[in-house]
Image (cartoon, rainbow, N blue to C red):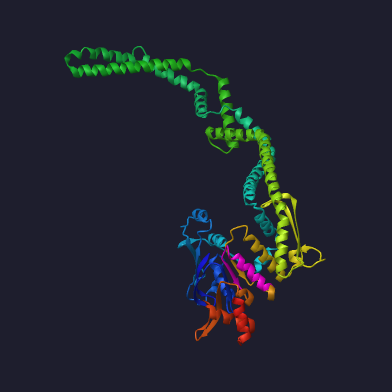
Amino acid sequence: MLTNLSIKNYALIDDVNVRFSDGFTTITGETGAGKSILLGGLSMVLGKRADLTSLKDKTQKCIIESEFEISKYDLSKFFEENDLDYESATILRREILPSGKSRAFVNDTPVTLDVLKKLGDQLVDVHSQHQTLQLTENDFQLKVVDALADNAKNLTSYKSLLNENKIAQTELQELLDFQANADREHDYNTFLLQELEATPLKEGVQEELETEYEQLNNVEEIMGQLGTGYQLLNEDQLGILARLADLRRNLQSLTDFGPSYEALNNRIESVFIEIDDIASELERLKDGVEADPRRLETINGQLQQLYDLQKKHHVATVEELIKIKDDLSKKVETVANIEAKIEQKNEEVSLLVEKLEKWAGKIRSARNAVIPKLKSMLQENLYALGMPSASFKIEVNPSETFKSNGKDDLIFLFSANKGSDFGELKKVASGGELSRIMLTIKSILASYEQLPTMMFDEIDTGVSGEISNRMGEIMQQMSNTMQVFSITHLPQVASKGQHQFKVYKEESELGTSTLMRKLNENERVQELAEMLGGKTLSESAMAHARQLLQ
């Protein structure tokens, strides 16, 4: 519940700080005194957007702070999800700076305006003329029916499935779109893949082919050079090996004259062995080299095929061609398997739709079961509010599509007078009738779900006398289980409050300011007397005021 409200530098308010209690609180004041300003300030701290016009003194910042006792609300998860410190006495603060920037805080932690509004919606239900218009909307009407039908768990299960179904439907559409596009590209991708698969693609193959091509293309020069090299090493008299053999024999005779000569001889021996091995390798290579025009032509064709593919796919290496081949293979395989995937996804969607139909049916049954009770409660309460002939026609019919709150179309028709045709609320109900219907619905909801602090903003507009007295009693009854505020201009309603505050203006040399204070018993009598008979207080008005308070 709202325990404290502080407003500084907002509209006509310099500085107002008031504490509130539980139960039923009424707020009164002359027209233009600033009751709407007070409500505007509260709305601001609950997340309504602000601008510089909100500042009374454009050089100072506006600060609005509200304190709530939230231990009875199940809000710990909200605080955890938004990384906020949970306190049973939670403080919401809003600051509007002279620059036009706005800041919001929950328990001194900065939050976005969206977070502030979501929290505010769970703390205070501000009933204004705008919300009365919600009464004419189908979603709100279904919300009322579902509250009485205890459909919360059914709707939770349904919404979870609905979300799964939306995801599955999106995935199915993506598969269908892919298939439509893939069918056009499949033949071309298959051709490209077959072209790459017909080519021997492996890492290093291009380098191997280019090396072999160079050897075959220059076979005569290679054979000539190898022959010349072999001859230089193996010529009988002048060959390198023959001369090295002579050198080896000469140095061998010196080995007995010291280790240095022996070491030199060993080096000559090593050189001889290495040169002899080179001669053998030259002979082997020379004998193995031969012209092969057919092989040369084959290799040339394979290389040209690689070069053409690289040019076609705008790459420079075989490794890149291998990657392209793998990607094409996946695409072709995906298209080949797309029918199976689509069939599998269709089965998944069908199963989800079947489950959705089941839960939608449960929701519909619960709604239909409670409609007679809702009609009876509405008509009974409205009878006491001066609408003895009020009648409702409420029907739930299956819809063609799944909606966020089920698969139903709600018919919610109203007739204010006996014999009158039923019609939509927004077409046949007056503003005063809508207010009374909304109050009745709120009072019914209060018995079925935990409502936040309720703030009624002149819901009694357009009514008077015994009807306003009954409206006050309804709000008083609601306050047995929740905190209720009523901004009112009717003494019959104001007198029903356990607490009464007055909003008034005060003029000084510095200008006009809106103030608010809690009235004591004598002040309440005077305020109610003024509401009954004007500023000139008559004894009869005072007596009537005392009677109302009793």
204 is within the stretch colored magenta: no
Front residue of 256/36: it is: 36
Q: Is residue 502 above or below residue 475?
A: below
The magenta segment is 467-487
Front residue of 58/493: it is: 493
On the image, which quarter does residue 431 sit in? Answer: bottom right
Q: Is residue 123 above or below residue 184?
A: below
Q: Is residue 418 above or below residue 550?
A: above
> What is the x, y in percent for residue 84?
47, 57
User: Quadrant where the C terminus lies?
Assistant: bottom right
- Extreme residue in the right direction: 419
Q: Is residue 393 left or right of residue 533?
A: right
- Extreme residue in the left direction: 257
Residue name at image x 34 percent, y 18 percent: 274
Residue name at image x 43 percent, y 19 percent: 226
Residue name at image x 74 percent, y 64 percent: 425
485 is within the stretch colored magenta: yes
On the image, which quarter does residue 543 sit in? Answer: bottom right
Front residue of 153/232: it is: 153
Q: Is residue 288 visible?
A: yes
> What is the x, y in percent for residue 390?
75, 65
Q: Is residue 151 above or below residue 104?
A: above
On the image, which quarter does residue 315 sit in? Answer: top right
> What is the x, y in percent for residue 377?
70, 61
